[in-house]
Amino acid sequence: MAAPNALAAQAGVDAVALGGTAVDAALAAMAVTFVSEPGIVSAMGGAFVAVWPVQGDPVVVDGNAEMPGRGLPPERFGRGVRNVWLDYAGGMEIQAGAGSVATPGAFAAMERAHEMFGGASWAQVLAPAIHVADRGWRVGAAAGSYLQQVGEGLFTFDPDTRAALTDDGVPHGPGAALTNPDMARVLTQLAEEGTAPLYRGDLAHRIADHLQELDGLVTRADLADYEVVVRPATLSAVGDWQVATNPPPSIGGPVLATMLRLMGDGTPDPETLARVQREVLTYRRDNLDTAADLEVAGPELLASLDALSLNRVPRSPNTAHVSAVDSDGLACAITASSGYSSGVTVPGTGLLLNNSLGEPELNRHGVHALPPGTRLASNMAPTTARHPDGSTLAVGSPGADRITTALQQTLAWFLCGGLGLQQAIDHPRLHLRVLAGDEVVVEHEPDPRIDAAVQALGWPSNVHDPVAMYFGGVGGALVSREGDLSAAGDPRRAAATAVG
């Protein structure tokens, strides 16, 4: 398995030792990640759990965040939001505060995935996270860097968040020793009672009532009415592999599937990668990012492949992710996101809430424009893949709108480019930023072939440092046709792999 840190990876191995499956391993690792990567991800965000069973078709358990506000009068919308400037990814302005919090679905999706595919008990799956929250951990490089970059503006206005993530207003950095005993108590309750308290019980009431006091939108009805959706995965043929991604209303899955289909089966090259990104990301900007109904717009993207200028494309071919496979061929990929964080912690729970309504790239209509109950847009694209010889892959990445381009390149190099999984993850990356009209900017890591492609295309570009965090953090787990297990992590972010 591949996970964001060693504590999470070890939790997955421990779950398997207790009779768990690859799904249990991934769930245990993600639960630990919720505790040990504060700011990067939260238990109170959204998640997609992609599973390819040993027998049967691949599915995605959709626990993405939802637009709240059931039963509230119109005048309540537009309140509880503060603009915060983040010195992150070149600088950006987000909306934070109670009004940026969407209805979370991550834990509900994880519980459903466990019910469908788990082997260990739910309490055993959550036990490592409880231990880490209670006994403590040291902040890793990725979380520490993020806290230091954004903490002064984002993690200081709420008293509980300030106390947890800063030292008298100075954000904690890598190596800081933290505990979260309040979250340990919450996780213990969820381990004993399931997620019902979080959606229909005392925890739900505490969360909703606190947000209502701060002019947020999440109500008790929003939490009680939240439903996980199990969806058939979107399948694409890439070489001899079948690749399964999350379907609409996700944006990430359809975008990744379209990129892979347009790439074809030949050896990838940087110019082709960039041209495909331009075709698909321009289509996304014009058709998906402002779509009123992603349930409709997503399938239209997949159905429009032949119209996406195939003749012009050469035919050569704040988020966390956990990937796990087992020797039986069960694969699980989980990507979870809480946005950039709302900066709000529910007192006495240790739960830092999401700002999924305040991510500007996913809310083109405005922070409170959607009807309550609408599934939000998402860049997340946890992916599973299977070869006719039985080889099975679980892979995914954090990284906002760089998720799909990071996975496009990793999968192209691994499935068609002749590289091993670790080599494919390590390979220098590019990402196309689509601006207004036909304007684009190529963001890329140093590489002679990418440099030559950028020069041939004549597009503006920015060169980043090698293995830059900007380009995501792909993690993959693989079982070969012989049943051999391996995993690979991304040097661009702190990562850990484990084989047990």
Image (tube, rainbow, N blue to C red):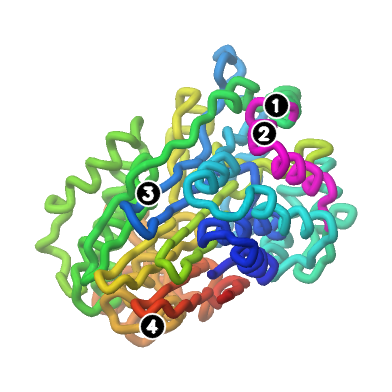
Q: Which residue is mark 2?
A: 198
Within 10 Å of disc 4 (Cα), the crowding (few <14, some 14-19, many 20+) is some
Left/right placement of residue 127 relative to residue 180 reads left
Location of residue 221 by image quarter: top right
Residue 220 percent location from the top left of the image: 65, 22
Is the magenta region chiefly helix, strand or loop?
Answer: helix
Within 10 Å of disc 2 (Cα), the crowding (few <14, some 14-19, many 20+) is many
Q: Amino acid at mark 4?
A: Gly
Residue at x 20% of width, y 62% of height: 262
Residue 201 marker: 1
- Of tags 3 and 4, the one toward the viewer is 3
Alpha carbon separation for disc pair 3 and 4: 26 Å
Left/right placement of residue 194 relative to residue 327 reads right
* Near-viewer residue (445 or 65): 65
Q: Which residue is mark 4?
A: 420
Residue 252 percent location from the top left of the image: 39, 51
Q: Amino acid at mark 3?
A: Val
Residue at x 34% of width, y 77% of height: 481
Residue found farthest to the front: 19
* Near-viewer residue (137 or 154): 137
Seen in the picture, residue 197 relative to 306 is either above or below; the reply is: above
Q: Amino acid at mark 1?
A: Gly
Label whose residue precedes the other's in the sequence (4 or 1)? 1
Label whose residue precedes the other's in the sequence (3 or 4)? 3
Left/right placement of residue 483 relative to residue 321 reads left
**Range of the magenta residues?**
179-202
Label whose residue precedes the other's in the sequence (4 or 2)? 2
Residue 28 appears in the picture as rendered: yes
Alpha carbon separation for disc pair 1 and 2: 6 Å
Reply yes or no: does residue 220 show up in magenta.
no
